[in-house]
Every structure is written in structure tokens, then in C-alpha cells.
Image (tube, rainbow, N blue to C red):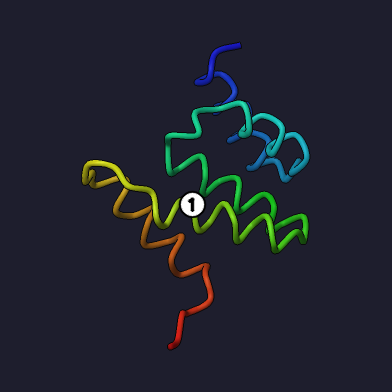
Amino acid sequence: MRKQAHELAGRIALAEKDFDKAIAELQQANQQDPQNLYRLSQAFEAKGDTAKAREFCTKAAEFNSLPQLNYAFVRMAARKMLPSKKA
């Protein structure tokens, strides 16, 4: 299966609340796409694995790529999921 097929299967599984399948599929999808990283964080959070959710949410929020409008929305959503950093 190609990475895009895994992404689609993961998105469908996430929408159907089949979080184990969503995680399995999204982990085989493009990990250089912050949207997939964010979807993984959502799936792990829904399963109650807050450590993994935070890990993937942080990766999505800190993903370094050329600015894109879609990425701006993902980054903003991922940062909202993370606890605020207070010094």
C-alpha cells in the first residue's frame, strides 16, 4: 500500500472511532506531513495515551516546513492541544 492509501485508511478509521486501526494506518502514512502527525495525536489522545498524544502533537506543532496555509491551521490546532509552556 502506498503512503497515501494508509493516510486515507487512517483518516477513515479515525472518523469511525477505530483508534487502533487509525494508529496502525497513520504510522505507515507520510510522517513528513504534519497533518498525519496531528491525526496520530488525536487517535492516541482518544485511546487515553496522553504521552504518545503529546509526542505526536509536539511533532506536528514544531514541524519545520515551508509555510503553507493548511499547515498553519494544523500547527495552530496542535499548539492548542499542548499544555501552555510557562517559564
Instruction: Give left or right: position of 63 versus 16.
Output: left
For label 1, the residue is 59
User: Which residue occupies 43% across, 34% down?
Assistant: 32
Instruction: Give left or right: position of 83 versus 62.
Output: right
Residue 70 is situated, as x and y percent measured from the top left of the image, at: 30, 45
- Marker count (numbered): 1
Of residue 60 and residue 35, the one placed in the foreground of this image is: 60
Q: Residues within 10 Å of mark 1 (few under 14, many from 20)?
A: some
Residue 83 is situated, as x and y percent measured from the top left of the image, at: 53, 76
Of residue 77 and residue 83, the one placed in the foreground of this image is: 83
Q: Quadrant of the C terminus?
A: bottom left
Residue at the far top in the pictured view: 1
Instruction: Give left or right: position of 84 versus 40.
Output: left
User: Which residue occupies 45% across, 43% down?
Assistant: 35
Q: Quadrant of the N terminus?
A: top right
Residue 73: quadrant of the picture: bottom left
Q: As shown in the figure, which amino acid type bears the numbered disc 1?
A: Lys
User: Which residue occupies 40% across, 55% down?
Assistant: 62
User: Which residue occupies 64% across, 57% down?
Assistant: 53
Residue 57 is situated, as x and y percent measured from the top left of the image, at: 53, 56
Q: Is residue 79 above or below residue 6?
A: below
Q: Is residue 66 above or below residue 10?
A: below
Residue at the far front in the pictured view: 87
Q: Is residue 42 above or below residue 24?
A: below
Q: Secondary structure at mark 1?
A: helix
